[in-house]
Image (cartoon, rainbow, N blue to C red):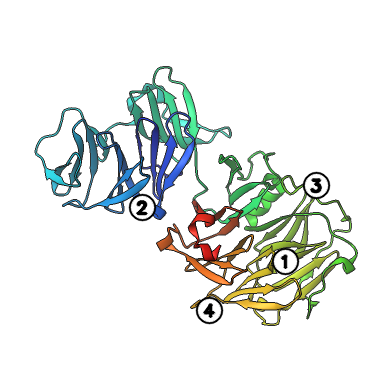
């Protein structure tokens, strides 16, 4: 909701248009219901207007006109005899359109449009003809809002709800504010969705996190979004260890790419699993002499963290001390626990950190030498995202290469997620789902409703696949969305 373009409402729904879609919220408690997006054939939204005569929502997106039925939960495209829609007007007798070919009215029922010369006296406009301004409402004076850090956000757009005596006001970069027209009191602050221009996506403490140098956002298990400012001088946050001052300072210097709850380093290297062809790596290893074995922390509330960044590996202990463990000139993309050791995926290859020892792991195909971009573990074994496909190590120590049919071997697999027998892989062309049990591939792309191929992270549970892009978080129901033979 960093950029809100239009607001409309039905008797029980609130519709908020943003560039990537239309949020559908409950009109009374403003809870999230769904988002109309590219998965519904809608993208680059310009306007939305509720037409009570037909009980549907008119949506202008990328120059095309759509009609969304809240009852059927389906959007269908309309084909009017005009283009260049500047405004949509709603009156008692239906919908009107101000276009580059003049004024038109839509038939009450049929998808037909007729030119008109005169307009009803009472008509509510959305778009260029909407003349309502924040300055029309004294209760909004001084026409900006201030957050808890004394940052100011100008009010740029308003929409009155005379039936319920509410006023919706858009604060640029801050979300949607709801005021009572009766008392003038602010009643709600609606701020949904991840950060625009987010650089990294992390799953930790039962939340999905988006990071950029000045701000972070988290989605909790109840579906609530939380925003945190992390600029220089902002007070430290206590909502998560990820928001400690040491980490936010680090994230402003080096992009945060991977996070793993840390159980402490085991001093006994014999407890680490020995990989074939392991050899000493040529990287600089920093060891904190104060580290000692610690009991496994609760993953939902980690007391210490391992952090992978653009330039190396760090450890934040429970006392807030940040210690460099591995200093590289290239990114650390992935971290995964392997019993008492930690697998580290980097541009320079795969490493095993066991106590004070650092081993480079060479797979028999040599693909890890070109970089390891993500690591996940499942019932079928260990999976590494590489250039040209996926490298798999089965529980018995056997290595395999997984290359989807027709996959471009010059392109990388950037992100992985695992749920039961399913392995999900993010590629430049979309997402691939691999069933490790029956060894079948399924493509999840734009045709299946994937909103964006620019994917910065994946997360999966037993029902959903979460797909993160800058400014966008999509959820794919893999139980219903994948063919039966692929689940």
Residue density around tag 2, few if under 14, some if 14–19, many if 20 or more, within 10 Å: many
Position of 8 relative to 254 (above/below)? above
Work out how far the residue at label 2 is from the one at label 1, CA to CA, in angstroms: 40 Å
Closer to the eye: label 2 or 3: 2
Q: Residue 2: x percent and y percent?
A: 46, 44
Mark carried by residue 344: 1
Q: Is residue 348 visible?
A: no
Determine the secondary structure under disc 4: loop
Work out how far the residue at label 4 is from the one at label 2, CA to CA, in angstroms: 32 Å
Q: Who's the residue at 32% across and 26% down the image? A: 136
Residue density around tag 1, few if under 14, some if 14–19, many if 20 or more, within 10 Å: many
Count of labels in the image: 4
Determine the secondary structure under disc 2: loop
Residue identified by numbered label 3: 318
Q: Nearer the viewer, residue 437 or 417?
A: 437
- Looking at the image, residue 142 sits to the left or right of residue 202; the answer is left
Q: Are marks 4 and 2 in contact (CB under 8 Å)?
A: no
- Looking at the image, residue 299 sits to the left or right of residue 157; the answer is right
**Does label 4 or label 2 sit earlier along the sequence?**
2
**Does label 4 or label 3 sit earlier along the sequence?**
3
**Does label 2 or label 3 sit earlier along the sequence?**
2
Q: Who's the residue at 87% across and 60% down the image? A: 266
Residue identified by numbered label 4: 410
Q: Residue 130: x percent and y percent?
A: 27, 35
Q: Nearer the viewer, residue 14 or 484?
A: 484
**Does label 4 or label 1 sit earlier along the sequence?**
1
Determine the secondary structure under disc 3: loop
Please state, as top left, top right, bottom left or bottom right, where the C terminus lies in the image. bottom right
Residue density around tag 4, few if under 14, some if 14–19, many if 20 or more, within 10 Å: few
Q: Are marks 3 and 1 in contact (CB under 8 Å)?
A: no
Work out how far the residue at label 3 is from the one at label 1, CA to CA, in angstroms: 21 Å
Mark carried by residue 42: 2
């Amino acid at each position: 909701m960093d950029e809100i373009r239009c607001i409309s409402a039905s008797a029980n729904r609130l519709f908020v248009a943003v560039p990537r879609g239309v949020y559908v919220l409950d009109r009374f408690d403003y809870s999230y219901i769904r988002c109309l997006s590219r998965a519904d054939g809608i993208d680059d939204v310009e306007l939305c207007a509720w037409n009570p005569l037909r009980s549907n929502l008119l949506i202008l997106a990328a120059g095309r006109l759509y009609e969304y039925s809240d009852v059927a939960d389906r959007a269908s495209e309309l084909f009017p005899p005009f283009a260049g829609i500047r405004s949509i007007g709603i009156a008692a007798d239906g919908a009107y359109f101000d276009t580059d070919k003049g004024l038109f009215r839509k038939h009450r029922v049929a998808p037909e449009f007729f030119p008109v010369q005169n307009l009803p006296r009472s008509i509510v406009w959305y778009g260029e003809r909407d003349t309502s301004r924040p300055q029309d409402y004294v209760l909004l004076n001084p026409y900006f809002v201030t957050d808890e850090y004394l940052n100011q956000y100008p009010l740029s757009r308003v929409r009155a709800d005379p039936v319920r005596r509410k006023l919706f006001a858009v604060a640029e970069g801050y979300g949607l504010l709801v005021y009572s027209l009766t008392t003038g009191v602010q009643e709600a602050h609606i701020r949904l969705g991840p950060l625009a221009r987010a650089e990294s996506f992390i799953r930790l403490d039962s939340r999905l996190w988006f990071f950029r140098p000045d701000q972070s956002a988290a989605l909790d298990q109840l579906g609530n979004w939380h925003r945190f400012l992390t600029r220089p001088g902002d007070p430290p946050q206590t909502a998560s260890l990820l928001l400690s001052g040491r980490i936010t300072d680090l994230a402003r210097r080096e992009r945060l790419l991977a996070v793993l709850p840390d159980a402490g380093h085991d001093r006994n290297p014999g407890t680490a699993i020995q990989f074939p062809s392991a050899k000493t790596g040529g990287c600089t290893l920093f060891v904190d002499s104060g580290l000692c074995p610690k009991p496994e922390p609760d993953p939902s509330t980690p007391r210490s963290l391992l952090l992978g960044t653009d330039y190396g590996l760090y450890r934040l202990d429970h006392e807030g001390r940040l210690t460099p463990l591995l200093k590289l000139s290239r990114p650390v993309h992935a971290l995964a626990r392997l019993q008492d050791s930690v697998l580290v995926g980097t541009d320079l290859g795969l490493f095993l950190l066991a106590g004070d020892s650092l081993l480079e792991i060479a797979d028999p195909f040599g693909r890890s030498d070109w970089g390891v971009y993500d690591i996940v573990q499942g019932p079928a074994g260990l999976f590494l995202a590489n250039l040209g496909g996926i490298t798999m190590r089965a529980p018995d120590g056997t290595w395999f290469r997984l290359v989807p049919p027709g996959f471009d071997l010059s392109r990388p697999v950037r992100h992985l997620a695992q749920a039961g027998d399913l392995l999900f892989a993010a590629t430049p062309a979309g997402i691939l789902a691999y069933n490790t049990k029956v060894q079948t591939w399924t493509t999840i792309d734009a045709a299946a409703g994937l909103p964006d191929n620019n994917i910065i992270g994946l997360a999966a549970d037993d029902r959903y696949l979460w797909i993160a892009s800058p400014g966008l978080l999509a959820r794919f129901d893999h139980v219903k969305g994948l063919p039966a033979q692929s689940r």
